[in-house]
Image (tube, rainbow, N blue to C red):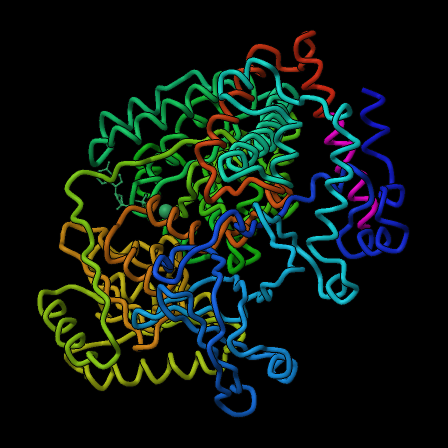
Amino acid sequence: MTEQKSFFDTKIEYLKGLGPQRAELLNTELSIFTYGDLIQYYPFRYDDRTRFYTINELDESLPSAQIRGRLRDWVVEGEGSKKRIIANFTDGTGTMQLVWFQGLTWLEKSLRPNGEYVAYGKPQGFNGRYSIVHPELDPVGPAMELETGMQPVYNLTDKLRKRKLDSKVISRAVRSLLESSWQHIHETLPAELIEKYRLISKAEALWNIHIPQNQAWLKQAMRRLKFEELFYNQLRLISNKLLQKEEFPGAIFKNTSLLKHFYEHLLPFPLTGAQQRVLREIYTDCNTGKQMNRLLQGDVGSGKTIVAFISMLLAIANGAQACMMAPTEILADQHYNGLKDFAEAMGLKIGILTGSTNKKKRVVLHEELQSGKMHILIGTHALLEDAVQFRNLGLCIIDEQHRFGVAQRAKMWAKNPVVPPHILVMTATPIPRTLAMTLYGNLDLSIIDELPAGRKPIKTVHKYDKHRAEVFGFMRTELEKGRQVYVVYPLIEESEKLDYKDLMDGFESIQRAFPRPKYEVGMLHGKMLPYEKDDEMQRFLKRETQILVATTVIEVGVNVPNASVMVIESAERFGLSQLHQLRGRVGRGADQSYCILMTGYKLSTDTRTRLETMVRTNNGFEIADVDLQLRGPGDLTGTAQSGIMDLMIADLAKDGAVLTAARESAQQILDLDPHLVLPQHTPIRNHLDRLKNRKDNNWSRIS
Ligand code: ADP
Ligand code: MG
């Protein structure tokens, strides 16, 4: 153990054949300091030089290919930055083109007409002809060292490349390290897991990730290292969660009298199976004597609010108070208005606190919260203020979690100095389970995966801008039926001025197409004052306006069941989850609803995928999966702080199956032995500690 530690802590300066200068470059450019750092600096791809392809075998799906052939001739085309060399390259099975945009002067001097070369790169097809842009080109000659096998390619910086410290140098250094470290590499996974998942050993994995014998070994090496990484990652998350549970007590809510009353007399519809299941999960949590920390994921319109309300009744029946925090005033108002009648029918006092609540009202509110007269408080961030104190806060619900940070959640905990309140976080931005497990590893997860019965799926179409007249015609038909329409414009801060102009122009053109007195068009955007927004929203809700032209301020939560058409302008500028949220504003009533995505003609492949996904499915989890594939986990909200960015080899967008297996294994081990004190778990415990230390060291290096 100690031996292993000292060996992999050796500074890379001492590595044979590397030397102090290169070592220093690796220190400063790639933060590689020790043998351990170097051996874990995995290649990001591999050049497959295990075989040659012929031109007639080429295929666009190949990530790269090497071809041996003759350079027949070449031409120089274009001017300025478009100037390029196009060469015809032939191998007897066909002809392809090699194209260069840079280094032209040198190339023209050194290319040999009719010379024999090996070209290597990514083949691209066009009209049945293949080309490689900027291929690697090596002349075939007696002195040629033909590259063979799978060549590792490491991430490099420009500075490293300039100093000729390339993938080959790193590869040689790693090889020499591997050769001398064979007996120092110890297994880090328990034998039973290795056996169960048929993993290769740590030493084999490290060799094959850097110097793969072939594709099959490379695959096994990756699988093994990903499993290990995710296993320890999950072990850490789950054990933190267990510790948190041990540490924080929670109030016990046994009494269900108010729930019974509500079910028997007030519940307007039968709960879906999923809603019932989640309520059972919450009830169980609130009876363990430990604090609940639960994330409730449910697609837009899946009925999270009623679940929240019933949970509040549970708290109140047991002598506690409840609060619900929403990200915007519009949404807080809506929750308040939606729940007021229920609460009052139950004889409960409910209040609302937002930025626009005046001082006089606040004083009363604070008083009623402290005396316990107020049972339920709905509000915005204003709830977090220190002046807001409860007599006995038992449950805190946070709606649309992606707008709140961990610090704010902690503030909520402190609102009950005796026992921290149970916490229920609700989000309508579904994230794939794999990601949720990691991102919110310290929360328990509930999912509402079922929509209330009788909902008609929203019909979604994609239309080009030039078909606007047709879209207006469709809007008219729906308006004739008494329905209402949202028209949404993007508003992205960098181009704010332009966006406002678009919004205003759009508003005017809609007013022209839908003139008074027959139609009333409203407008809602973020620059309006809270009461103005509220008025505008109320007018739409009361059907005084039929069309609401808005920015994404309506993205979260607003509920106008009579609105059946959502037109999204410049839909190419929205992300998938945003489009899905916006679409969720319709389809809330009994009528067939529609979502129309408007775009120009020029669309990137990713944008097309986004639009096609929206047209194809209404399922938020499916959409979240596509989003994850397109953007990768790093771009999703909240990932930066979660530690998942520390993953070196696993990719949460792709390694769902490995993650599930790793998580299950970690869970089983911790179920048996939460503190990893059993002798058979000592190696796991030690490795976990080592990882923690290494991380602390890395942090101190960076800061
Ligand atoms: P979200 O999960 O997006 O917050 P809401 O809680 O706003 O969804 O619910 C959307 C609509 O569905 C509301 O009008 C609500 O009254 C209704 N609803 C909720 N649960 C059911 C159910 N079990 N059956 C029928 N309608 C329901
Ligand atoms: Mg909601």
Left or right of residue 471, residue 604 in this image: right
Does residue 535 appear anywhere in the picture?
no
Residue most toward the front? 142
Quarter of the rendered structure image containing ligand 1: top left
Q: Position of residue 476 (x, y in %)?
A: 13, 74
Left or right of residue 106, residue 290 in this image: left
Residue 63 against residue 692 in the figure, above or below: below
Left or right of residue 224, residue 247 in this image: right
Residue most toward the bottom? 79
153 or 672: nearer the eye? Answer: 153
Q: Is residue 525 located in the magenta-colored stretch of the structure?
A: no
The span picked out in magenta is 689-703
Q: Residue at x 67, y 60 (%)?
A: 143
Q: Residue at x 47, y 60 (%)?
A: 67
Q: Quadrant of residue 519?
A: bottom left
- Give the main secondary structure, helix, strand or loop, of the magenta stretch: helix
Does residue 36 appear anywhere in the picture?
yes
Q: Position of residue 393 (x, y in %)?
A: 55, 32
Q: Quadrant of residue 281?
A: top left
Q: Is residue 701 located in the magenta-colored stretch of the structure?
A: yes
Q: Residue at x 75, y 38 (%)?
A: 695
Q: Position of residue 311 (x, y in %)?
A: 40, 30
Total marks placed: 0
Q: Position of residue 2 (x, y in %)?
A: 85, 21
Left or right of residue 623, residue 293 in this image: right
Q: Quadrant of the N terminus?
A: top right
Residue 544 against residue 230 in the figure, above or below: below
Residue 429 against residue 480 in the figure, above or below: above
503 or 315: nearer the eye? Answer: 503
